[in-house]
Image (tube, rainbow, N blue to C red):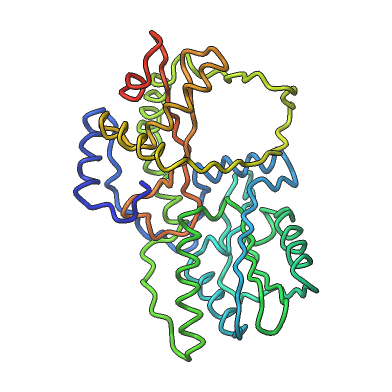
Amino acid sequence: MSDTHGSNDEFDVLSHLLDTMGVEGSSSQIARRAEGAPVPMSYSQELLWLLDRATPGMIAYNLPLVRRLRGKLDVDALERALTLLATRHESLRARFAEVDGTPRLVIDAPAPVTLRRLTASDEADAQRIARERGRTPFDLAHEHLFRPSLIALANDDNILLLESHHIVLDGWSLAIVFRELSAAYDAFRAGKEPALSPITAGFGDFAIWQREHLGGERMATLVEFWREQLAGATEPLGLPTDFARTSVPTFAGGSEVLVLPEALTRDLQAFAKRNEATPYMVLLAAYATVLSRYTGRENVLIGSGSAGRTLETETIVGYLNNTLVQRANFAGDPTLTELVGR
């Protein structure tokens, strides 16, 4: 779920729909684990861990985040705020290692967080430092995967650099981190104790719950569901590129930003409304159409990131992202309206 304001009624409806499809709803409450209990990786974490093992030194999942801090900075208050966050959220002091041959999530005891202090000669130098830090690989087994640094340009001009690995943080978590960091810093700077909401469950509790909840017969049922949904459509699309695909992914790429004209945006929204769809569904159908025309494929599978959150997990800091597969079926050469309906 990507809406932080979803109601209990909405989750009840979702649970009913899952039950109707024969897929059990996730109504179990996440309980605190026993002290000293071994903590497994979540399924999403295990995937990133395997990718890291297969490609040592990979930086594709580094998450360098930069915030400009102008004005007088209370470094002590900032470090206290970072320490509080690492104490509250165990993902910020987690490592990943094999214990007795089994990959585990290793959560270290809380400890003071010290900012790495760096100095830049000018703006360009600060950008260079931030880029170099952002390209520094993480050692998943031997270091915490949340590295805060402070780049000083002047006494009243600093850059806060929060380096993390995606295996411990996702976009949803980053919003929590920045919100709590800001509140804690303001409180400490004012000589007060931060008033943050209590933590009801940590990421380790979620990981244990997930393994228990999705194990055995339930996992077999879910796997069979997806095998039926994706039957006969799992081969790579094979886009006609001007270079050969490498055997080992390089993760080299770029991004292109396109701003749609206001009139086109209005037309898109009106088309979606007429077809009882969302603009996302319309754009997804258009994207799938382009891929189908380039490849000649009747079935197009598109992976879409999901926050993977419910009411129980919306306050947990960690990597809960999941990739959902969406299938576009072009059998019978459908119109765009027909495809959106499918």
Residue 100 % position (x, y) = 63, 47
For this view, does 290 lie left or right of residue 118?
left
Q: Is residue 97 above or below residue 247?
A: below
Q: Is residue 327 above or below residue 277?
A: above
Residue 295 % position (x, y) = 57, 15
Residue 257 % position (x, y) = 57, 43
Q: Is residue 150 above or below residue 76?
A: above
Extreme residue in the front direction: 263
Name the residue rendered at 67%, 54% in the picture: 141
Query: 306 or 274: which is nearer to us?
Result: 274
Q: Is residue 45 above or below residue 155?
A: above
Q: Quadrant of the C terminus?
A: top left
Extreme residue in the bottom direction: 191
Name the residue rendered at 59%, 67% in the picture: 67
Asked which quadrant contains residue 336, the reply is: top left
Asked which quadrant contains residue 30, the reply is: bottom left
Residue 6 % position (x, y) = 27, 52
Name the residue rendered at 47%, 13% in the picture: 298
Q: How many marks?
A: 0
For this view, does 241 lie left or right of residue 27?
right
Query: 111 or 189: which is nearer to us?
Result: 189
For this view, does 48 lie left or right of residue 24?
right
Name the residue rendered at 53%, 60% in the picture: 91
